[in-house]
Amino acid sequence: MAVFYLIRHGEPVYDHMLENGFWGFGRDFAPLSEKGKEQVEITAKDIRLKSAEIIVSSPYTRALQTAQIISRETGIRVEVDIDLHEWIPDQNNQYKTSEESFELAREFTKYNGEYPPDEIFRWESLSHMKQRIRRVADKYADYDKVIFVGHGMIFRCLTYIEKMRPGEIIECTYQKGQADCEYSFT
């Protein structure tokens, strides 16, 4: 059984992405804000992280920067896992505005994350996200302690936590093939 430290990336800043018309996957290039860097500097000093064996990061810039700050503080190597990416609001990456992305998120919520029978929407379903995060969790379940750096929505699929703050750590235990991470609030 592994101990997972699920860490949501620090606060990002999207100004440059929006100014340059980076839509769809282009928004995934958004870096951490100065506040986000400060959040993660504090997180990186958490004593629990020192004993981890590996840091596994989402491929998104904000998560990679978060993982790099934690790696610098702990000396632990970073590995990127593509399946640790955030929820996909538009699988064709065609949305052009933040409002359109928010509308897709509202639609996701309206249908509780699952497509009604015989319908297909643009967004990634909850069941697909759960399968994806469980593949990642199973891949690293043989380690003793793993730091995952990623996104609130994907981590909620593993823990059912309502909301994670930027830079927050959720500690949980996981066994390969298990449906969810077991955790307790501290």
Image (cartoon, rainbow, N blue to C red):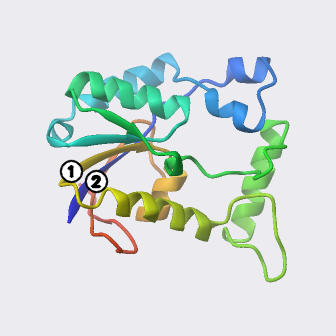
The quadrant in which residue 29 appears is: top right
Query: Which element carries disc 1, helix, strand or loop?
Result: strand
With respect to residue 104, does 147 lie above or below?
A: above
Relative vertical location of residue 56 with respect to residue 118 in this rendering, above or below: above
Question: As drawn, is 38 to the left or to the right of 91?
Answer: left
State the image coordinates of residue 47 (x, y, percent, origin top left): 15, 36
- Seen at 24% across and 23% down, the residue is 73
Mark 1 nearby-residue class (10 Å; few <14, some 14–19, many ≥20): many
Distance between the alpha carbons at the discs numbered 2 and 1: 6 Å
The correct choice, above or below, for 118 with respect to 76 in the image is: below
Give the residue number, with chain letter if any, for mark 1.
145
Q: Is 29 above or below relative to 123?
A: above
Question: Mark 2: which secondary structure?
Answer: strand
143 vs 55, left or right, is left
Question: Residue at 77% across / 27% down in the picture?
Answer: 22
Decide: few, some or many residues near mark 2? Use Cα within 10 Å; few <14, some 14-19, many ≥20.
many
Quick check: marks 2 and 1 in contact, CB under 8 Å? yes
Q: Which residue is the extreme one toward the bottom?
A: 117
Task: Please name the residue that numbered disc 2 is placed on.
Answer: 4
Label 2 sits on what residue type?
Phe
Q: Residue at x 21, y 28 (%)?
A: 74
The disc labelled 1 sits on which kind of residue? Lys
Which residue is more in the foreground, 138 or 110? Answer: 138
Q: Say which residue appears at 37% left-offset and 42% top-offset.
A: 56
Which disc, if any, is residue 73? none
Query: Where residue 25 sits: x, y (%)?
Result: 71, 37
